[in-house]
Amino acid sequence: HRTGDNPARWRDHLSNLLPAKAKIKPTLHQKALPYAEMPAFLAELRQRKAIAARALEFLALTCVRTSDIRAAKWEQVDFREKVWTIPQFSKTHKEHRVPLSDNAVSVLEEVRRISSAIGGSVAASEFIFPNDITGAPLSSNALLALIERMDRKGQMTGHGCRSTFRDWALEQTNFPWELAEMSLGHTVGTKVERAYARGDAREKRREIMQAWADYCSMSKPKGDNIVSMSRPSAP
């Protein structure tokens, strides 16, 4: 019913009259483990044999979002090239290729064995991480419930693993920040720079993801360093 500029537009209009959203409602970041605690957490997680546990481990190793894990399908994984291609990455809705570390491939092999052992619709599911009853995707709360059972509620979330990885890359490695950002699926560079740099640095990202996986494998589960000793015989 009208023409011309939108009277409710934000940029260069209402932005001059109203405070920014961030000043009214500060951004609440997802809880994340300090990177120094991640190896011990994953060592504990590996003692659990459920599909949800493998999903959380795979999430931590690939640094994607929970929605990407729940929607992951076997047809998206190229085991020969060790690449997981997400057709519509969360938020960007663009294709995102995730180079898989040896550790991440091992998780996929393990979850396939678990699904096969369950059988039925679970073994036949197109989803990599199905629920263990119907074969449909895991529920949106499955990983949070697992984190709560591990007494980590309030300390971390699945999404927070991305922040843990980013802190580790910044503080413990010499990898360029652009590489870490690309590994998270973030847009890097200006529009002009992206127009010329069209590659995704997959092999370089493979290096950083393997380094992250190696770091996450440093710790052993509790009690794994205990050696039982026989009682000496009486003289």
Image (cartoon, grey):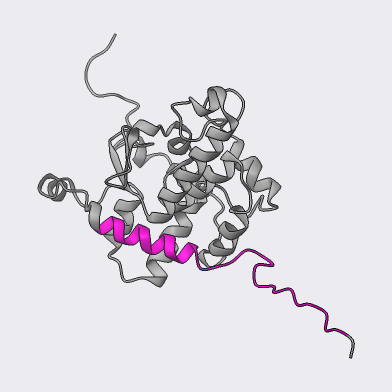
Taking the image as shown, residue 16 lies to the left or right of residue 23, namely left
In the depicted structure, whether residue 169 falls above or below residue 83: below
Residue 124 to residue 44: above or below: above
Number of callouts: 0
Front residue of 24/141: it is 141
Outermost residue, front side: 235
Furthest toward the bottom, the residue is: 235
Percent coordinates x, y for residue 172 in the rendering: 41, 71
166 with respect to 99 (left or right)? right
Q: Is residue 208 magenta?
A: yes
Picture residue at 60% right of the left edge, 53% below the top: 45
The answer to whether residue 135 of the structure is visible from this angle is no
Q: Quadrant of residue 180?
A: bottom left
Residue under the point 61% across and 41% down: 50
Residue at 48% of width from left, 34% of height from top? 70
Image quarter hosting the N terminus: top left
Q: Which residues are magenta?
A: 204-233
Q: Residue furthest right?
A: 234
Of 113 and 144, the residue lying toward us? 113
Residue situated furthest top in the rendering: 1
- Quadrant for residue 134, please give it: top right
Instruction: Name the residue nearer the viewer: 156 or 124.
Output: 124
- Image coordinates for residue 41, horizontal then vertical, percent: 59, 59
Indicate yes or no whether the magenta region holds residue 188.
Answer: no
- Percent coordinates x, y for residue 73 in the rendering: 40, 32
